[in-house]
Amino acid sequence: MADDTRSKDETPAQGGVEPAPARFLPAFVWRASRDGTILYANPWACKYLGVSSEKLVGQHWNVFVNRDDIEHVLDAVRQMSGLALLRNVDVRLLRADGVFRWHTLHLQATRDEAGEIADTVGVAIDIHDTRHAWELYEASERRLQASFQGACMGAWEWDMKTRVVHMTEQLAKIYAFPAGTGTVTLDELTERVAPEYREAYQRQLDAVLRQRAPFEMDFLLDEQVVPRRWLRMRGHPEHDQEGVLARVYGVTFDISEQREHEERLSLSERRYRALVESTGAMVWSADPDGGIRPARGPWGVFAGPDLSHVAGWGWLDLVHPEDRALTRRKWLDALRQKTAQSLTFRIRRQDGVYRRVQANAAPLYDQYGNLQEWFGTTADVTPQYEAKAAIEARNLRLAVAMQAAKLSIATLDLCDWVLSIEDSSDKRDIERLTYEAALARVHADDRVSLDRYVQHLARGENPRANFEFRVHNPEREQWIEGSALLQRSDAGKPVRIIASLVDITERKRLELMLRESSRRKDEFLAMLAHELRNPLAPLRTAIALMQKDEPLKGREHELIGLMQRQVEHMTHIVDDLLEVSRITQGRIALKREPILVGTAVYHAVEAVAGMAQARSQHIHVEVPDATNWICGDVTRVSQILVNILNNASKYTPESGSINVTVHADDIWVSIVIEDTGSGISPELLPKIFDLFSQGERTLDRSEGGLGIGLSLVKKLVEMHDGRISVESPGPGLGTTVTVDLPRLHHREPHSGATLSILDAPDEAAVRRVLIVDDNRDAADSLAMLCETENHVTRVAYSSAEALEAAQEFRPDVALLDIGLPGMDGYELARRLRPKGDTTPLLIAITGYGQTEDRLRAQAAGFDLHFVKPVNVESLLKALSARAV
């Protein structure tokens, strides 16, 4: 076979042994010695290199290996050690046409007798086309990934039989899956959809998959997973031979910016439409040559339902004859200039009346700069025109009035900045001087601000209504107050500034005196309050000591009680004085915390209950929602409410009534206190919050105080960012005080606290439950709650109804409201269960939740005490319990 493929004189060079199969291999084969000298090259190698075997043998193998790859070959040879005498390496080999092509080089070494590497056989397989194709594939893949990333797009494939989703890295990033995520389930994909869109998303997806056609759908991702992101999914379903949905593949991309742009565009369109409609303007468009196309709506109202006579250039026939030529010329000028224009003219309405209108037109161009059309609005400005004329007439009357008021009139002509000052006492005496000379007469500290005011006014701005400044006067400091207006020409150009000036030096002196007097008053009040505390402290101590002595006789007991009451009254007055002083001087800092309004109101009512009871007055409290909160100082809020309630009781006759109502909206909690007392006269009402302000006293001075209570209350309410108002129809018709405090959207858990220990039975027992509450909604809802546990209920809305129902119903448990009208819950508890009895089980349901309230309930015989709103679980458990 060797003789068939080579000449007789062709032998292996330098005694090299030719590998038997190498001659017939369609691959590059050579053998080289340890130093790299080629000992043999097969015919394929010679043909590839374009070199004969005789010329090739004896050369170094690096003559046909790309020099950048030589080191890779040497590294492969050096790594041959031990039994590992085979290595592969990719190299570029020089072809006969001078082109390097990629080959995979398989190297195999042989050892000599000493065990060293003797020579190496290399077999090179051409992989150039394969490698090139792979590089093209990788480049294409990189471009595809770059395209996906640039477009914020990812590809996916759903296996509908396994419900597994295969996705690209970019899509995993869009869905906010962890880096490296390549597969997820369909359920995990659906969970990424915003909860409010999830049901609609699944319903729409099911519908499009049933259609067996490409689909597209938009959805929003869950904002808890990723910031607000809208996605658009385009997919194509595939079915197997049986028609079963097998897989769905497609792409998903981020359209958040597009949606945001569409929403802004839609909002802009709505704003524009609302703006045009609100102005009542007549909208129109026009061809580039000027023929208008009126839009229906306001045009139909103005010109009539048939707009054909208005279209094109027909609208000019409606223009007033005196304005027609000028209006036509201006419109033609606008068409030639192709710039926005504004025209004012008179036009005839369908009823024949001419109205003054203002037409605004703007050219619209396409992307190439070509005029497409005109867009315009025409608005009826007759009212504005008439108003302007009326304003000018009013200004003239105002100027005349200023001259008649004995004021100095200053006129600054803006053409030459010369000031004319006209003394009101003598109109013939007019002083003229330059603006700089007049400004030099102004006090140095006020000169800059006055000049700035004048300059702003001269430019057509309106800095403020009035101004004040001082002028040089060797005898005394002289203050001037003025007001100014800018007069314009018919063309709208500023012409002059006219100002009225009055000497306010005396008023300024009185203001300083009042301010100093107020400061001294505050200091005196603070000093007086502190000084009065010194004698009060030992008086109170002495009274306490006297009460601890031997039992006092009747008259002595009365006298000491009188002294104690008067000391307490005087202490209260001193406290009010000190509080007013502290607030005025800003020395009170609130300790704010969440406050339950119902609790605060009930505490305040309890504080004045003794006073009201002594005067046989009835206090009704209505707190529909006991869970309203405010943020304030507990002590100060209590001080506000107690002070108002004290006033209400003090000025309400015996057997009168006081109503306290609380209601709230999203912003305010309002506490309204109404009484049937003496009321307030219209003369006093505007001054009711002034310090030391008070109504008419009785001869025995039994009513009223120093008149500092409401002043103190107002200051405390304002410190809580609240507001207070007082209303009264008049003397003898009662007073209504409303306190509004900012609502705190805050909730605190409430739970019932037991007054005695209960043992829960092994099995829940059915109870007969009597529910007593004057709030019908509260009572009825509580009854329904009990009935859900199979308890038998009876509802009563007053103490009298409760006593009557108890005789027939014989309840096992009684749920009693404390704040009942007439007979309160404490007295009702005593009557329902006489001393020594164990039934019924008494449970207090109340808005009073402090320690003293619980102790009072326990003293009245209650077994349990729950604060509104009631903890349902605790209450139901209590209903099925047995008292120890």
Image: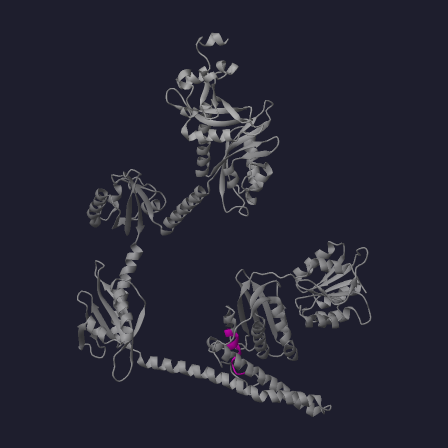
Q: Nearer the viewer, residue 153 or 672?
A: 153
Residue 107, can we see it? Answer: no
Residue 252: image x %, image y %? Answer: 50, 36
Q: Does the magenta stretch include residue 710?
A: yes
Residue visible at 17% across and 66% down in the picture: 416
**Span shown in magenta:** 705-715
Q: In this view, does 392 lie above or below 695?
A: above
Give the image quarter of residue 308. top left
Q: Is residue 212 above or below residue 264?
A: above
In the rendered view of the protein, which quadrant contains the C terminus?
Answer: bottom right
Q: Main secondary structure of the magenta part?
A: helix
Coloring scheme of the render?
Answer: one colour
Residue at the front extreme? 114
Q: In this image, 278 relative to 330: left or right?
A: right
Q: Is residue 81 above or below residue 583?
A: above
Give the image quarter of residue 101. top left
Q: In this image, 695 relative to 766: left or right?
A: left
Residue 62, can we see it? Answer: yes
Residue 334: image x %, image y %? Answer: 23, 45
Q: Which of 186 and 558 is in front in this view?
A: 186
Q: How many labels does the image show?
A: 0
Q: In this image, 514 relative to 455: left or right?
A: right
Give the image quarter of residue 191. top right
Q: Nearer the viewer, residue 357 or 237?
A: 237
Residue 499: image x %, image y %? Answer: 25, 71
Residue 347: image x %, image y %? Answer: 27, 49
Q: Does the magenta stretch include residue 208?
A: no
